[in-house]
Image: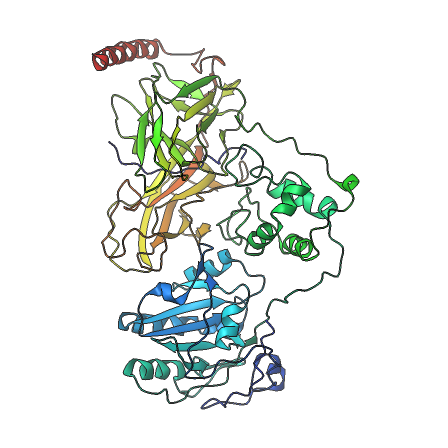
Amino acid sequence: MFRTNWCFVAAFSPLLLCSSGCTKPPATDAVAPPVEQAVFSSEAAAEPSNEYPLPAIGEKVADFSFVDLRYLPRKLDEFGDKKAYVIAFTNLDCPIAKRFMPRLKALDEQYREQGVQFLSLNVGPSESIVEVATQALQADIAFPFCKDFSGEAARALGATRTPEVVVLDAEQRLAYRGRIDGSVRFAGVSPKQSRADLQEAIEDVLAGREVRVKETTVDGCLITFPQENKTPDREVTFSEHIAPLLQEHCQSCHRPGTEAPFSLLTYDDAAAHAEMVGEVVLQQRMPPWFAHDEVGEIINHRSLDDEQRQLFADWVAAGTPEGDPAKLPAPLELPDVDWQIGKPDLLITMAGEQQIPAEGYIPYRYATLPYVFFRDTWVQQIEIHPGNRDVVHHCNMAYVTLENGKPTEHFITGFVPGGTAMILDEGTAFKIPAGAVLILQLHYVTAGMETTDQTSVGFIYPKGIVNKQIRHMQVKNQSFAIPPGAPHHKVVAERTLEKDSTGLGMFSHMHLRGKDMTFLAHYPDGKQETLLIVPNYSFDWQLAYRWEKDQKKFPQGTRIECIAHYDNTDFNPYNPDSTVTVHDGPQTYHEMMYGFFFYLEDEENLNLTVDPNTGYVLENEPPENSQAASSVEQELLAQLAVAKQ
């Protein structure tokens, strides 16, 4: 069949105080900090008491877990056999932690091939995984950045400050705990060369000898642990506080008949799933969002802010009180679950059912829809409608013609869970050319039982004048080779806009090794702008990111660059095989690198009157277009007749 580049979601539519209780030995070459540094320096203030026992040097540390950038709970054992582990406790705002990032990067690059596994664990109470992933990306650090939401890892290892580091040997026995080195203090960089504490500890562990200096003091910021079993100091009820948030951020998906695993329309719904809702809200994995907030002007952001997340936490901690039902907001008028676009003007259904097994991996499947567009057809709304939402992970659609049988060049739209139908603004439409047939690429997942799917596609024709045709560039690279075991392999591509354009939005597509993607604009005047950072790409949630209408302008000659990284290590939980070199290819065990850039051409003014019943142009149609359509129809009918024989 054909190779495809897809997975567009069709969303360019109106879619610790840590307390050790111990006194650590002074660091070599330590310099007494000024008085104003006391809050940041363990040398200037006694460590608070700690109800948790401090692990001793030489002891095997207690088992602990942490959360990776895919929101999965992980353990050290999942790294495989390592000669040493270096765990650095970090956050986003500690100045000393920031200054040590280049040093940690250099040490990782020096010792990675010697069997040393580096790991950063973020302990910032309100810092999101998207922010943590962005920190790693901007520092160009290859080793995993993860999150210690509960403080479990910090307590298990006895960490009290950032950027405190811990070194474990191959048996996960505590070999070193303390600072990276004494070169960076709160007031700045030390003018004299200091002892390389962390590096010497690594060398000692690799050599199989006792670490010479086992503990050092740490300049840095105290870790603030989450408070357990805290009673809220305010009244938070479902009716007054939680229901409005669910309406604004959750109910468009979490209702009967959708892909969401449970409904959140009523108090009983929310109370029955309160602990789960509380966890995903705390971790900021719901509502799903994978773009960094500080770049771009993205309008389809649905995430909760800090105060809203705290309301959920307080409600769960208080025992999920319902409150006064009279204070409930009026129910939302939600789009029809069956068809977001309403009753389609044209409905095309797959010719037969797809048989889905009860278990196992299902390669991409392809289906040609049984319909031929004999004339140029303009459509304003398109919706891919899975026949069985339990098994359709995502579906993408493109067209092919007699002249061009490569759907990679003619992507139209797609479906992913939580996505929206393609609903274009008035005056804008998509043209399906004469002679086209539609191809579906379907990614199925199993649901624990044998079942079937028969997906349909619905179309709405324009009901007014069409002035603009929606266009997209595929910023792609198909010649990469990702080495075995590579943790942070870089792939770059770029395309240039040929005319003055207005941007609609962006969408990134990779497969299971995809790690991040950044969109940059290089303007003709030499300026550069970061348009989008997706620092923790998710194959399961391939979202589109839209700009406000008519707000993002790009002059002719603007280069759109996409930079992606791939994780081909064993620690990637979805990696099909970390031992192979990975190339571009259509299946999920291959990889892809596509950045979609959607736009309109500013000077275009088509002024087309379209038949609202057929999608055909009614006025000013050149005679040759009608003749061409007739010729195409005759040729296609002849081919179909041959195919039926």
Q: Is residue 535 left or right of residue 268?
A: left
Left or right: 367, with 448 as reference point: left
Residue 11: image x %, image y %? 48, 36
In the rendered view, tell whether residue 390 sits above or below residue 605: below
Which residue is more in the foreground, 481 or 426?
481
Location of the N terminus (image quadrant): top left
**Residue found at x 50% / y 29%:** 424
Q: Residue at x 45, y 44 (%)?
A: 541
* Residue shown at the point (54%, 46%) measured from the top left: 297
The x and y percentages for residue 278 are 60, 53
Which colour scheme appears in the figure?
Answer: rainbow
Q: Is residue 392 left or right of residue 641?
A: right
Which residue is more in the foreground, 481 or 263? 263
- Residue 508, percent across and down? 40, 44
In the rendered image of this protein, does residue 11 appear above or below residue 430? Answer: below
Apparent side of residue 593 relative to residue 133 in the rendered image (left or right): left
Outermost residue on the front side: it is 449
357 shown above or below 517: above
